[in-house]
Every structure is written in C-alpha cells, then in structure tokens.
Image (cartoon, grey):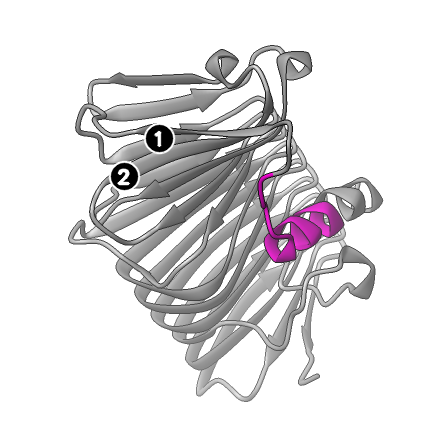
Amino acid sequence: MRRSLVPLVISLILLSFATFTACEEDANIIYPEVDPFDKLIVAHNVTVKLMNGNPDLSVSGSGDLSSVQLVVSDGILTIALPNPGTAQNVVVEIYHNDMVSVSCTQNGRLNLASDFTTSSHTLTVAAYNSAAIYSYHTITVDTLDIILSDEAFVGFSQVELSKNKLSMWSGTLCFVEGTATDQLIEMSDGCYYNMDDRDSGWAFSEPLQAENTWVSVRNGAMAWVNATNYLNAVGTTGSIVYYKGDPATIEENMTNGAELIQKND
C-alpha cells in the first residue's frame, strides 16, 4: 500500500516546482465572472493552484480546454476533466480569500500555493482515491479537519492551529508540521501519519507540535506525534504510535500487538 503512494507524491513535488509557461500549442482561458463559492472539489486528473486574493479563475494547458468542467452549485465549485484525452497539462489557477472546504478525488491535485487563512472556524481538507492536497506555505485556521481514504495524500509543511483533526483510512499518507493546541487522530488500515519515509519524496522535518494529543490507531496504522503536555494513545492489531519528547502525562491502551514507542528523531 505504502509503495503505491510513491509515484503520486513524487509527481506532485515535480508539479509544484514546474513552471507552466505557454508554448505554441498551449492556451489560457480567463473566467472573469464565476458564481460565488466557498467550497471546492477537484477531480479527474486536474491540477489546481489555490491562492489567497480577490476572486479570479483561469485555466491553462493544451488541447480542448473547453472540455474542463467548471460548475458552481450551492456554493460549491467542482472542477473536472472527465475525458483526460481531450486536454493535457491542465492547470486551474484560483484566487479566493475565504474558503470553507477543499476536497480532491480521482487523481486530482490541489496545491495551496500561498499563505492560507479563512474566516471560517473550520477548514475541511478531504482527499480520496489517489488524490493529493499539499502546501509549502503557512496555513492559519482555528480547526483543520483532514480526511483521507483510498491511497490519498496530504502534506502541509507549516500550520498554525488551535485544533488538528485527522481521520485516515485505507493506505493513505499524511505529513503535517507546525503547531496546535489540541490534536485528535483516528487511523486505520495501513495508513501512515508523519512517518519519515525518504522514498515518498516529501520534505519532512518533524511532527506537528501539540500541547495535547489523542491518537487511535488500528489494523497496522502508524503515527508519529509530539505532545508536550498530554498524550492519550489507543491502539490495536499491530499498530504503532511513536511519540517525540516527554509529555507530562501519558495514558495508553495498546492491545493485540500494538505499541507505544518514544522516537525523538
């Protein structure tokens, strides 16, 4: 499961550093007016760059860019390329100054390409079906709610939070660095959180530092956490929770071969 994520992560790293410049067959479409939205869904082999700024949207790439679907309904913008053969190297650039949720599915890629904040109490980030959501910039929000399933990937190199909520299933991979007051983690079925895997291609330094962490792992899941004050670890069926530092209080319930192990580097 874990190895299957390697090409996905390496490809998004390359995409983040690539410069999408126009060539003779490339085109660019600017959409001056889009119905208001504060939620985003990315799907079907499309790469989206989301940046803070006054609302603006453009699509670049080659081939028939009109085949890229942009639909706003009930405040949700859905972006998809149902037939990948009609357009290539599709990149959608979005400027928006207040998002509530972003999600990615079916090999979609979403890059939060500038410092990111929102007036919403909670920012929901969801990735499914081999999709990837990532950022090398600072994300500042009260509660970050991350949901992953089916070999999806999330990587955030710097967050500033009151609460980090994380739910992971089915061979997913997630890295989050920065600070939070509280962290609540639920993981199952061979997924990995902040496990330093050089083969993944993601530049990772150390786990999110939280004052208090509650973590539950099942069925071979593995997590590395950093709790300065309180750590509550529950695990079963061969799962492992690694923890950094010396929490003032540790409570654990590890059964059926699960382990709680100190790991400082």
Circle 1 sits on which residue?
30
Q: Position of residue 101 (x, y in %)?
A: 32, 39
SS majority, magenta? helix
- Figure disc tally: 2
Q: Position of residue 186 (x, y in %)?
A: 51, 49
**162 vs 116: above or below:** below
Q: Dot 1 lies on which element?
A: strand
The amino acid pointed to by label 1 is: Ile
Q: Which residues are magenta?
A: 9-22
Residue 222 seen in the current view: yes
Q: Seen from this angle, which residue lies furthest front?
A: 24
Residue found at x 63% / y 58%: 17
Q: Position of residue 195 (x, y in %)?
A: 69, 64
Which sits in the foreground, 182 or 234? 182
Which sits in the foreground, 250 or 229? 229
Mark nearer the N terminus (2 vs 1) = 1
Q: Position of residue 104 (x, y in %)?
A: 49, 33
Which sits in the foreground, 203 or 193? 203
Residue found at x 71% / y 58%: 258
Q: Quadrant of residue 140?
A: bottom left
The amino acid pointed to by label 2 is: Asp
Q: Dot 2 lies on which element?
A: strand
Residue found at x 39% / y 46%: 50
Task: Indicate whether residue 133 is drawn in magenta.
Answer: no
